[in-house]
Amino acid sequence: MTSPTQLGTSASTVYTVGAGVTATVKEILVSNISASISTVSIHFVNSGGIASSANLMFPAVSISANSSIAFDVNQVLDAGSTIQAFAGNATAVNIMISGFEAS
């Protein structure tokens, strides 16, 4: 679904479900590539919505230095929905999303 993407410290879109399809997210892999602990927060945002506490699914999850966490997810998203994420430290965390789309 996505290639590895480096996160900043404010919510940004890392994946958007295309028009006319639904997406099934199977796994979200996050990697802390820094020598210090960091966090990641991930939102599942409905089409037309914004990242908020109402759609924050993984809030400030700690990631040890130089390590990765895999979130096992089985979530269906409708067309136009987004996954938005941010890290606690700039340039510290990469994210990659796996799954499939169906029309």
Image (cartoon, rainbow, N blue to C red):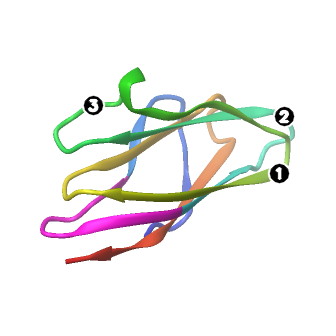
What number of labels is visible?
3
Q: Residues within 10 Å of mark 1 (few under 14, many from 20)?
A: some
* Residue located 19% across and 59% down the image: 79
Q: Secondary structure at mark 1?
A: strand
Query: Residue 101 occupies which quadrant of the picture?
Result: bottom left
Label whose residue precedes the other's in the sequence (3 or 1): 3
Rendered position, 86 above or below 77: above
Nearest-to-viewer mark from 2 and 1: 1
In the image, is residue 38 above or below residue 3? above
Please tell me which residue lies in front, 52 or 93. 52
Q: With 11 as the anchor, is 9 left or right in this view?
A: right
| Residue for badge 1 | 67
Q: Secondary structure at mark 2?
A: loop
Which image quadrant is residue 54 in? top left
The kind of residue tagged 1 is Ser
Amino acid of disc 3: Ile
Tell me which amino acid carries mark 2.
Ser
| Residue 50 circle label | 3
Magenta span: 15-26
Quick check: 51 above or below 46?
Answer: above
What is the CA distance from the residue labelled 3 to the residue labelled 2?
30 Å
Q: Position of residue 83 (x, y in %)?
A: 39, 48
Structural crowding at the residue carrying mark 2, measured as other residues with C-alpha within 10 Å and reported as few (<14), some (14–19) or many (≥20):
few
The one nearer the camera, 14 or 45, is: 45
Query: What residue sits 84% from the left and 49% below the top?
Result: 66
Asked if the residue under mark 1 is in contact with the one under mark 3, i.e. CB atoms within 8 Å, the reply is no
Q: Residue 37: percent from the left, percent from the top? A: 81, 33
Question: What is the spatial separation of the Cα atoms under label 2 and label 1, in whole angstroms?
Answer: 10 Å
Side of 71 where 44 appears, left or right: left
Q: Quadrant of the C terminus?
A: bottom left
From the image, tell me which residue sits under label 2.
36
